[in-house]
Amino acid sequence: MKNNQYTEFYAQLEENIRQRSCPVMNAQRREAFLTFSAQGFPSTRTERYKYTDVARDFAPDYGIQLSGGVGESTEFCRPLSKADIDVTPYYNHIADTTDSVVALNTMLAVDALLIHVPSDTRPKHPIQINNILKGKQDTMTLRRILIVMERGAEADVIITDHAADHQQFLCNQVIEVHCDDNSRLNLYEIEETNLMCTRYSNVFIREGRDCSVRHTSLTLFNGHTRNSCRVQLAGEHSEAILNGCVIADKMQRVDNNTVIEHLVPHCTSQELYKYVLDDSAVGAFAGMVHVHPGAQKTSSAMTNANLCATRQAHMYTQPMLEIYADDVKCSHGSTVGQLNDQALFYMRQRGISLHEAQLLLKSAFITEVIDTIPLEALRDRLHFIVDKRMRGELSKCEGCKLC
Amino acid sequence: MEDVTREFVNKDYEYGFHTDVHTEIIAKGLDEDTVRLISAKKGEPEWLLEFRLRAFRYWQTLEQPSWAHLNMPEIDYQDISYYADPTAQARKDGPKEIDPELMKTFDKLGIPLEERMALSGVAVDAVMDSVSVKTTFRERLKEKGIIFCSITEAVKEHPDLVREYLGSVVPYRDNFFAALNSAVFSDGSFVYIPKGVRCPMELSTYFRINAMGTGQFERTLIVCDDDAYVSYLEGCTAPMRDENQLHAAIVEIVVKDRAEVKYSTVQNWYPGDKDGKGGVLNLVTKRGHLRGVDSRLSWTQVETGSAITWKYPSCILSGDGSQAEFYSVAVTNNYQQADTGTKMIHLGRNTKSTIISKGISAGRSQNSYRGLVKVSEKAEGARNYSCCDSLLLGSTCGAHTFPYMDIHNDTAIVEHEATTSKISEEQLFYCRQRGISTEDAVSLIVNGYAKDVINKLPMEFAVEAQKLLGVSLEGSVG
Amino acid sequence: MLEIRDLHASINGKEILKGIDLTIRDGEIHAVMGTNGAGKSTLSNVIVGNPSYEVTQGEIIFNGQNLLEMSTEERANAGIFLSFQQPVEIPGVSMTNFMRAAVNARYKAQGREQLSAGDFLKLMREKRKIVELDNKLTSRSVNEGFSGGEKKRNEIFQMAMLEPTFCILDETDSGLDVDALRIVAEGFNKLRRPETSAMVITHYRRLLDYLKPNIVHVLIDGRIIKTGGPELANEIDENGFADYVAR
């Protein structure tokens, strides 16, 4: 039993939390509490958390937000407590219940957001969820999102993180995505917070047959960020595309951890993560592609490319393969390097200053990730934001009226 | 394809015989007295006994590591004999005599110990169980100031050198198996190449496990002084036995200014039978310290044997401009498991490292590459290129890649790539249409795949390694 | 316009230029001919300030300014343009953004007002026509996926955009077919103003027939060993460099 502020908080307020929440969430709470209190936070000796000191990130004395805060119901989004379907088979079903950070979320989250796209339906517009961290004291928020894509459903979901106040915020987010056969989902996560924000995100995706899921994670401004994305390819002929980019400077830290499990034959996965690190930023990328026995004809490619601009910027990268089937095409590549000298010279010969040439090349480096985004409006917006970010004109969430 | 798989039966392990030679074996079990006994048998000075005891005491505080992608059988460290001497009887009969049985054993292994019969240009130190049997060409090497002898003799004859370098690259605190080896190491080779000397012949150590119920704890130390050069080869075999035998070795290499060391291994310990019974547990810490400016070290390994391989020949590049290479072919078949790779630690400026790893898995084996490339803050201009490829033969084996890159300097250029492939039916069909049998075709394709590494081996070893690749994979593919 | 005195330069410690003296006046076109490895490209790289090359001796004066003390981009903005022998590909940077940055820098150096986005695109359209550069190419990344001929035309297009006063054409003709060569050469002639001067590096007479140099230099082993009028180019075209190398 490892007691800390969170186990004590739960022990005192369990009844209060239960009353504010709904049965389907309460049903998982006790188990999560037991897991969390038995394990405590993982140490950096745990392979998956090698590059992130979880206990330190959760150490501050955060106020814990227990209000729902999920917002009004719309056609496709509603609080889990007002679910239009039976969510018992989905909630906390594919999340890794043995992970302490996930267990903490399950133990304390009061409400969740349900995005439910019925069979053969496609929302007219992308579903956008803007999270604005706001408050007069240091706060931890527990965000829980459940996405249920029925057979043949299609959707674009954009989730943004902003911070409106200069307090220490910690967001502990768990997203579970269930994709039934032949569904398609584009899930974007864009983080533009500030140096005082800490983010723990655990995304779990399970795909049936003929599905396509594209997850794009953009860390444009942050404090400490730990993103985990785990995908199970459980039906044949499905694909998973995980892309991400990170622009970090000052003392920012970004740790992306991905696991793609090929459970069945004939699936495809692709990963592209790019980092630009400046000042004393620390970046980590650990990607694992796990091809289970029998998952023949798997095709998988993983790329992680990184630019370090200073000696103080550190990059840790770990592209891993675990393969138990022989008829597969798997590759991974990882690079750490600098801007192309020849390109810099060419640009300077055209009269572009060294500084400007570097900016253009850095933006171009990130552009490869942005250009994979099918939504044109979002792509254009991101090009604009990335350019501003590179120029140091984006110190907090750009275009947000609250800030 | 599966049909052809069944057609082949596993070819017998060629070196699986046992030599009936009188061997003095100390009682099983490990405590401080065992350590004292080993030290006494070898007639060691006090400082070395102290070193062993410190290592032993430290080892007792450790737990066996479990991070590797290996399913390791429980090792009962009290059920192993830590010292077996096949030369004891002969020594009683008269000094300098070698039991004819031992000579025959090494002959049978293709390692003649009589200098007139030796492979041209190769000097051999032959180690059986815990003792060095004979080192050839010592006198000729001595003329150039080169020291090549067993580490036991080196302790007696060159104590200052041994004391200066032993444990300087792999301290006993390095890891569990290194601590164990430091406490109980028996024999191995010692090489010293003086300043400016280019060693005129290949130096080679051949390790043989013979006695039952023993472990082998070899210890090799190579020091290559300024502007010197040496190429060193290591080979190993063991009899077929149903129980696992432990081989926990340490190899330390010191490379000084502008010196160059090439270290090649063809590892062919008994891999266990086709059901995974028996075989050597090969748990080895190998490391080179490129201390000098513009020094060079290359590790080349062909790993075909052992039930379990846990081995990461590493390089610490602290001399400015030093260059290190790691070339590896690891083959696993049946129930073999390998977790092998390298560490390249860049500390000096303008250091360069290359990693080429080729994993080949067949049967029900598991083959993992695990590597670390670290560029420290001061390693201005460091370069690394890594390429880790896996070839899978059959659908019941596993091939895994666990590379780690820790980059702390903005001028570093580090590239890693990896691919996984199989021998395609088209390739096999094409060969067969040209009249090449399936097994020859597999051997051909595998050797082609491993060519980059094999080419790095000295000639005699390259031929040996090529044969070995074919044999190790027999019965694995159709 | 440009005056080079006793110029020595090396790359990776190896001396390539072993004392070059060369004066190019306003409006003049000089051709530099020579064997492979004679130092022609080194000369052009040193003039524009490629950081890979080290000048060990000598000086270069451009319109009264000491070029060697200026950064690559300062030289470019002073009006020096190099048409690269092998233009580098820059993935991810669009031609438009690239040119925009370069034109802005040039205008700023000249004290001119920056172009609006509309005017800039208009300028791009106009200049593109001169070298018959496809619209599609300007929407791509710099030089990425361009054929050899397209890359060379793209170089001349950039020259048109930046209006330099001194141009270096480094083997702009190599690998071009007759039509492409004509387009590039005529493009250059159209862009030229009376005061524009140029240094043309080539192996062949073909390009010189279009550009009509005033003066021809023969560069062998890091030194200019012969200087003459346009007739020298014809002579080399017929006889090769054998006479000069033999010396």
Image (cartoon, coloured by chain):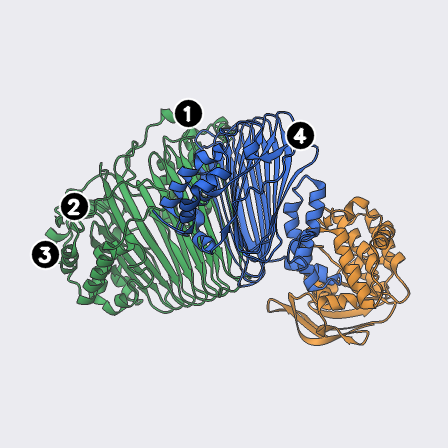
Chain colours: A blue, B green, C orange
Element marked by disc 3 = loop
- Residues packed near mark 3 inside 10 Å, few (<14), some (14 to 19) or many (20 plus): few
Which is more toward the observer, A272 or B360? A272
Going by the numbered disc 3, the residue's amino acid type is Gly
- Depth check, mark 1 against mark 4: the one in front is 4
Specify which label sits upstream in the sequence, 2 or 1.
1
Specify which label sits upstream in the sequence, 1 or 3.
1
Residue A122 is labelled as 4
Going by the numbered disc 4, the residue's amino acid type is Arg
Instruction: Pinpoint the chain carrying mark 1.
Output: B
Look at the picture and state if A250 lies above or below B474.
below
Going by the numbered disc 1, the residue's amino acid type is Glu
What residue is rendered at 40% in x and 37% in y?
Answer: A31
Percent from the top left, x then y, of residue A80? 55, 34
Q: Which residue is mark 3?
A: B94
Look at the picture and state if A286 lies above or below A391.
above
Element marked by disc 2 = helix
In the picture, measured across the screen, residue A350 lies left or right of residue B388, that is right
Q: Which residue is mark 1?
A: B2
Going by the numbered disc 2, the residue's amino acid type is Glu
